[in-house]
Amino acid sequence: MTKGKSEPGRVSGRGMVRDAGFILAGAVVFGIGMQAFIKPANIAPGGAAGIALLLSHITGFPVGALMLAVNIPLLILACFYLDRRFAAATAGVSLVTSVILDGVVAPVCPVYDGDRLLSSLYGGVLVGVGMALVFLTGATTGGTDIVGCILQKKKPHMSIGRALLLTDSVILALSVPVFGDMEAALLGLIALFAQTRVMDSILYGMNVSSMAAVVTKHSDAIAARIICELNRTATVVPARGAFSGGETEILICTVPKNQFGKLSRIVHDEDSQAFMMTAETSEVHGEGFKEF
């Protein structure tokens, strides 16, 4: 790849192989968490997976197939309101995750039938690890991730976290009559908490967003890919090296946790000699983040 002259959205062959490996590994770990711990414990920790678990308990259909069915209408919405390339990538990841869960993991994975509290904890941890591996590629597993992206685009100052929390709360509440057990909701909340904390710690410490300052001579190429692939923007500031005296630029960009891995890869692909500094942020105000 010629530094600073690559087309936005272009990914190297090595990067594609790496992403495929992360997605496959994430799908397997996700499937193990669901099949070995979450499903036998009769809990539904929110999201498309939670809806699929409730439907599976009622109908007896495989969880993976139901997850894909739940994602289909959301993927159609993503085609209209989001980037079609994002929708296509999410559709591919959803299909891979469903196939691996039903066709690979379910037939061979042992089922833990012990304490439900341990099931919720270990299941939440494994599901969180699996989803984090997928997020590191810049993709998502669908479900409420799509809803969050659409809400973020249509209502930049809306509290996305609160909207998704409301959705997950409804799923947790529905698990009580479906499973006929009040503990189902409480254990589902524990699994959801463990899942979220593990994802946050893997993707970006324990924080929501990150601010990156990139010292580079190829800021235009990096900014173009940030706008195209992450649907974010950046600020470019002219600068001068104190030691070399040479002219350079500093690109400043803030992204949420699930896009940090993709941002790092974009910077490396466009300028392997760039100098990138990252600051952890727990409060980000402005369009696309939290309202002032």
Image (cartoon, rainbow, N blue to C red):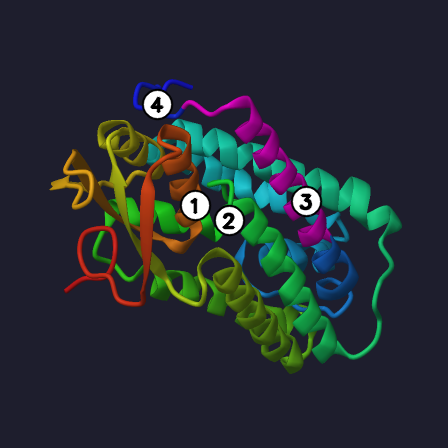
The quarter of the picture where the C terminus appears is bottom left
Q: Which residue has dot 2 on it?
A: 143
The amino acid on which the numbered mark 4 sits, given as a three-letter code, is Lys
**Relative image position of residue 59 (x, y in whole percent):** 73, 53
Mark 2 and 1 residues: CB-CB less than 8 Å, in contact? yes
Q: Secondary structure at mark 2?
A: loop
Nearer to us: label 1 or label 4: 4
Residue 146: give its label: 1
Mark 2 and 3 residues: CB-CB less than 8 Å, in contact? no
Q: Secondary structure at mark 4?
A: loop
Magenta span: predominant SS is helix
In the rendered view, does 195 fall on the left or right side of 3? right
> Marks 4 and 3, how far apart in space?
30 Å
Q: Residue at x 51, y 47 (%)?
A: 135
Q: Which residue has dot 3 on it?
A: 25
Q: Earlier in the sequence, mark 1 or mark 3?
A: 3
Magenta residues (range): 10-31
Q: Earlier in the sequence, mark 4 or mark 2?
A: 4
Q: Earlier in the sequence, mark 2 or mark 3?
A: 3
Q: Which residue has dot 4 on it?
A: 3
**Relative image position of residue 27 (x, y in whole percent):** 66, 45
Nearer to us: label 1 or label 3: 3
